[in-house]
Image (cartoon, rainbow, N blue to C red):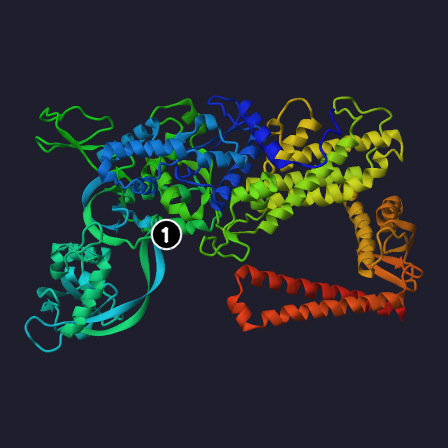
Amino acid sequence: MQSGLLPKTFSPHEVEERLYRTWLEGRFFHAEDRSSKKPFSIVIPPPNVTGMLHMGHALNNVLQDVMIRFRRMQGCNALWMPGMDHAGIATQNVVEQELAKEGLTRQDLGREKFIERVWEWKAKYGGVIVNQLKRLGCSCDWERERFTMDEGLSRAVREVFVRLYGDGLIYQGDYIVNWCPRCHTAISDLEVEYKEQQGSLWEIRYPFADGSPGGIVVATTRPETMLGDTAVAVHPDDARYREVVGKEVILPLVNRRIPIIADEYVTMDFGSGAVKITPACDPNDFAMAKRQNLEIIKIMDGAGVINENGGVYKGQDRYECRRNVVEDLKKGGYLVGVKPYLHNVGQCYRCKTDVEPMVSKQWFVRIAPLAKEAIAAVVKGNTRIVPAMWEATYFEWMNNIRDWCISRQIWWGHRIPVWTCEECGKTIVASVDPDRCPDCGNAKLRQEEDVLDTWFSSALWPFSTLGWPDRTEALKTFYPTSLLVTGFDILFFWVARMMMMGLYVMKDVPFRDVYLHALVRDERGEKMSKSRGNIIDPLEMIDKYGTDAFRFTLAAFTAQGRDVRMSEERIEGYRHFVTKVWNAARFSLMNLEDFSAAAPAAAPQEPLSLPDRWIFSRLDQVVADVTRCLDEYRFNEAAGAVYAFVWHELCDWYLELVKPVLYGRESEAARRTAQRTLYTVLKSSLKLLHPFMPFITEEIWQTLVADGSSIMTSSFPAAGELPRDREAESRMTLIVGVITAVRNIRGEMGIAPSRKLKVLLSAGEESARATLQEGSRYIVNLANLEDLAVRTGAPEPRKAATGLCGTTKVYVLLEGVIDFASEKTRLEKEMAKVDKDMAVVERKLSNPDFRAKAAPAVLEKEERKGRGFQEKRQVLRAALKRLEEMAE
């Protein structure tokens, strides 16, 4: 064994780069299309080609890597399929911004040249996030990397479109859609983000057309849209308007006669109970217009500018028009009142521009038949959603889904595979570019200008990346995939659409399990944003603390259904854990220099000591816990279990307990037995840690095992491989408890760790007395005692500090150890100082000006200081009380 070769400190950056290169060269991430091993597959949620690694990416990919490394070590043929999304609108926007720096627009270049520029941009910048994922330690099968506009995936997109069209599930029609005036394209319902805004509710009087007095008052948040009104609607049961239904009113400013109609959609208790109907500017009004056979009048163009139907307002921006319309309504005496109104305004998810409902000719997928199958698959358990609470959300949305608008009025993306014959007008839908019209033979064919929604190609990701429409070996082996890890926020954008397309095309679900993680927020639970100044950059954290500490922090705080609260302090805390692991391994290796794992145990064989039996039993339990938690996607519990075992049970206790044996203070046979135990426990601990902390575990493994193998190809520990010993666990719990009680008394009484003490243990039971006597050498050593007496039912001695461990009383004899008067004076002075410091903090926190002006981070720091002083004061008060009781 090449033991004792670990440097004094772990240097993450040098190790990470070297080991990742070694993993790639050894093809350790590669999965086989044909294998006798059980398949396990994950397809990566493809990051946008425009992407840079943020905390959401980091969390998502760390969790996937934990699972893929875990299953790989369990002996699975584990595939993690990587790739990127072309991100139509986002990428086009980025390239257009680059062109603007040159004083150009995409129209200046033309479609073909613009697409060339996008491909150039993708080649130059598109791989940035891939390299950043590699820095995270992601063990993707990079040889299979795919892109949603690869030739193979483009072929899949066309094939699915043609099939859906042939089955009557894709159609084209005039319909009201969400239109982004900035991106100049339709976007789906799911791509609209709603933001609460303070607006106004304008009440407008529409005079009766027959000249009768009064009129009908309507309320609206968008007065400019009245230019396209084609009716006023009331509820048929509203007694206030029963006599006027069927009459006409004059549309103010436009002077167009429009009818008063009755429709059950109208809410009687909103505003006046009468609503203006603008079919071209509101989806509900559009639906009513279809029911009531109303005219549909478009008043805006694609840039949100009023068109010729707006009369004198033609050419005005929608918001300029709003101001002018309100002013003219005032002048004309039509404006009855204005009230403040808080409402949700839809914005484009990409550029945050207010969307405009607009009627246009678009392509749609008929969703209801596809959704029915996707609902049934979850009901039957063919796909499991974790946490299960998201199932209700999934069902609610799928049961109320509207047809999916899949056409986008941009240039970057999969162009819709539809052609029109310019001679005879025939529509041709084909997966391969047609040469001529199949009806008239004419070669003049015009292809549809629009491209498909990015989510259309992403919906095919689980099978298109595996080679479909060809029936490849990879597809046979890895589809359905085993697991999808993604954020809950794209449950509808992506997960539901993959479910529908997978069932439609492959006749099977795309994945067996879907794990939905929550958002990464700051330590106060606030959403991270540039405006708040609370963004944590993953790459900065990796540079500062190393990848292993960063990864472990993410896993340790990922609890099902809860947002992940992240702070630099937490990452720094887990860097200490990385250091603890390194130091423990270094100590172990120095004490294993003359040990060979391959050699048979030396004779005579010493029986396992109590600490050996205990650590084996605890290790077997933690193996069972970590395996169960990862099987159930309880990442925080899995990380917590291995952390507690390695830091506390292995490092804090076992290594300390066996030091005298390793240092040769007992027999050589005992030393050999302890070495074998230490080797086994360290090796298994590294395996348990590896999915979370791949770099440090691999680096230590190379020295510990030294056979050229990688830890990622070793077998993950299995529960039951080591002896479980409940008796040893119970006995060690008592011994550890006694040592801890003595240490706590030292701390409370301010006794130096180097000062040897006298301790009396009063055991409540004979079995406890026997255990304590057998373990007395451990207690004396680790509690640093001069003398230890163990009795059953011993009376409490004078001037002794008392601790309790189960039914055993721990008496630390203090006479001659401390000066009671001096210690009392010291504690009182320290309490006075704490009181003074606490008063300063309390004055700050009680000052309204400070609370109003202080940055959140500063406020949190002061509150944390205050809590710390309170806790310290409680400890000092308890110590003082104990001292006073003993001095009596």
Q: Position of residue 280 (x, y in %)?
A: 18, 55
Residue sitting nearer the eye, 566 or 243: 566
Is residue 834 in view?
Answer: yes
What residue is drawn where x is 62% and y is 29%? Answer: 711
Placement of 878 over or under 489, stated as above or below: below
- Check the picture and name the quadrant holding the C terminus: bottom right
Callout 1 secondary element: helix
What residue is drawn where x is 26% and y is 37%? Answer: 411
**Residue 96 as seen in the image, left or right of residue 52:** left
Quarter of the image for residue 819 reads: bottom right
Q: Position of residue 767 (x, y in %)?
A: 85, 49
Q: Residue type at mark 1: give it.
A: Glu
Residue sitting nearer the eye, 21 or 748: 21
Q: Residues within 10 Å of mark 1 (few under 14, many from 20)?
A: few
Q: Position of residue 77 (x, y in %)?
A: 52, 27
Residue sitting nearer the eye, 161 or 836: 836
**Residue 316 as seen in the image, left or right of residue 684:** left
Q: Which residue is mark 1?
A: 396
Placement of 881 over or under 428, stated as above or below: below
Q: Residue furthest front?
A: 102
What residue is drawn where x is 66% and y is 34%? Answer: 686
Is residue 148 in view?
Answer: no
